[in-house]
Image (cartoon, coloured by chain):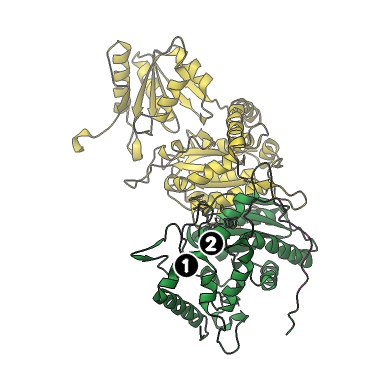
Amino acid sequence: MPMRKVMKGNEAAAWAAKLAKPKVVAAFPITPSTLVPEKISEFVADGEMDAEFIKVESEHSAISACVGASAAGVRTFTATASQGLALMHEVLFIAAGMRLPIVMAIGNRALSAPINIWNDWQDTISERDTGWMQFYAENNQEALDLILIAFKVAEDERVLLPAMVGFDAFILTHTVEPVEIPDQEVVDEFLGEYVPKHAYLDPARPITQGALGFPAHYMEARYTVWEAMENARKVIKEVFDEFEKKFGRRYHMIEEYKTDDAEIILLTMGSLAGTLKEFVDKKREEGVKIGAAKMTVYRPFPIEEIRALAKKAKVLAILEKDISFGIGGAVFADTSRALINEKEKPIVLDFILGLGGRDVTFENLEEIVEISKKALEGEKVEEVNWIGLRKEIL
Amino acid sequence: MAVRKPPITTREYWAPGHAACAGCGPAIVMKLATKAFSEAMEEKYGDPNAFAIAHATGCMEVVSAVFPYTAWKAPWVHVAFENAAAAASGVEAAWKKLGRKGKILAIGGDGGTADIGLQALSGMLERRHNVVYLMYDNEAYMNTGIQRSSSTPYGAWTTTSPPGKYSIGEDKPKKWVALIAAAHQIPYVATASIGDPYDFYRKMKKAASVDGPAFVQVLAPCVPGWRIPPEKTIEVAKLAIETGLWPLFEIENGDFHNIKFQRFPKDGKFKKPIEDYLRLQGRFKHLFKRPEAIQELKNQIKELWRILGKEVELP
Ligand SMILES: Cc1ncc(C[n+]2csc(CCOP(=O)(O)OP(=O)(O)O)c2C)c(N)n1
Ligand code: SF4
């Protein structure tokens, strides 16, 4: 029988790692993810987890050790956030290029400078081009579930790409919520043993991994990563179906909430989705036709789902905790790509908010709806809007 | 005195067909190191192939693994420039979990070891991974076209330490990574030179045989980087030993009071002058117009020997 326990997001991630039975874990502490390696250490110390836990001297070595272990053919896990993820940056490309199904938990946190330990998504968003799949959790249950899902998708022969699962710093990493811990046998059935098909360092059948690619081969190698990421769309949906059958919880590339007759749809990721649903309920009571949508999978980008969502809305308002300087939010830019050749498309507006742990309040959301309404009525508004900015201190 | 030569296995792991320069010192290192490793694995585990290699970016990686070819007949992985030691840690951990017997060989140049990879190396040694780290020391970044590293010797020309009106070339003493490695009190640390291949072979075997981490720093001349003719590689590497410029030693468990030396003259007097070593190499050519710089180099080497516990005379 699945067990229900009240736990922090970090603990949920550690539990997911325990259930997935990786053979090697390498990690280095960083706020807000520190509890993940701590908890895993405890599991290992108590004999509850049979993994080799490498207490590395940096995140760069953490991910390098994961690449080494994964290249040797075993299931591998790590966790980090923010500067730690940035320090891994170089090796993230290598993990994907070598097609190693490493899974990593990220307590989404802002990047320096100024140094800031609180939540936004700049860390993972900045790694969007590395070839890693990206999942974002709304709550602690999703953090646990999505890590299991990530392993299953990553190890699928049609994919073989690494995956990161983000859950918001403090809002989830340090907040306790009831989480259902699935039965080990069911997880075992779901994930199965990882049997490497292409990556192993076996003296009985020696292979060379991580070779130099000349111009004659490099593009093709990169294309296979592209292809794998395209394949991942289908595989993720299959795995979502299977997950529902085994565990009873349903996931979508984009989950919609009261969107069917909505004129304005607010699209976001992560824990903000919870707040949005509540806000939508409130506005519906006031008779405002708005809906909410949560992007669970950001890479591969859910292009078809965005198009379907956009068909329903007159204004698609994107709420995101990241910024790509010189253009706007990353989700906004990506959404624009998804809609560029659509015949009918909504007005797409971008709202940058919640950076570095700034609270996202109902007043902020009201402001977003106001701007969206103006756009709906044909008034000219900014495409990229910073919400909750304290202009008086600028 | 007749030198007893240990047999060297005919097994090959570094296949012909790699793209290294004619006379490449590091290429000789690759060949000998893997042979020695295989002998050690055969003696220890009854399986000469019981090892895998994690390689840092650098000349030897680039010349040996150009897709779709490979010069390696052993399981081999390259991750990046600075993390061979960390990647090897991961491979070793995976092997432990898989119950696979054997040892991991991590290979890096002086740049990937003394500079950018020093932190990962220190972490790996301190965590006591069952890995041999082999630093082939060609004393500069050769892959990017001969820039100085912290292992470049005093006075040497490189493209980033050019001699000029206000410069004698590299102006800092060489960093001795073997001593840094030994400070981790790991089971085995050694220096070697391909000028004495049997000594190097024995040391690699020893390194592969101990339980836990080991570190070997081997001098390996680079033809274009040192500006030497290809047929002089071994001669130069030999002179480094004979002039006292390159101490051959072993340190076990960080015991600096019981360093074992090889090829050390009983009276502490080296017979051949360092100039013999320098003269063969274009990278030191300019020093002959600056005798004070050669004297400074000698002082530094004497000081290194003193730190190692030996008073020496250099002619
Ligand atoms: C992070 C990073 N910085 C720089 C480089 C460029 N680079 C590749 S190999 C190399 C030098 C290698 O020197 P060394 O380790 O001494 O080996 P050698 O080429 O001499 O064999 C450099 C600077 C790189 N690959 N990665
Ligand atoms: S440049 Fe030097 S290290 Fe590189 S292959 Fe040539 S001789 Fe060997």
Q: Which residue is mark 2?
A: B227
- What secondary structure is marked by label 1? helix
Q: Which residue is mark 1?
A: B285
Magenta region, residue range: B6-23
Name which residue lies at 59% across and 43% down: A102
Which colour represents chain A? yellow
Q: Mark 2 and mark 1 in contact? Answer it, CB < 8 Å.
A: yes
Give, as a three-letter code, the residue at label 1: Lys
Q: Residues within 10 Å of mark 1 (few under 14, many from 20)?
A: some
- What secondary structure is marked by label 2? loop
Disc 2 chain ID: B
Residue A230 visible? The answer is yes
Task: Give the dominant element type of the magenta stretch: helix, strand or loop.
Answer: loop
Ligand 2 within 8 Å, label 1 CB: no
Is A131 in the magenta?
no
The image quadrant of residue B294 is bottom left
Q: Locate residue A137, reporting x and y percent.
A: 49, 34
Residue A39 visible? The answer is no
Give, as a three-letter code, the residue at label 2: Arg
What is the spatial separation of the Cα atoms under label 2 and label 1, in whole angstroms? 10 Å
Which colour represents chain B? green
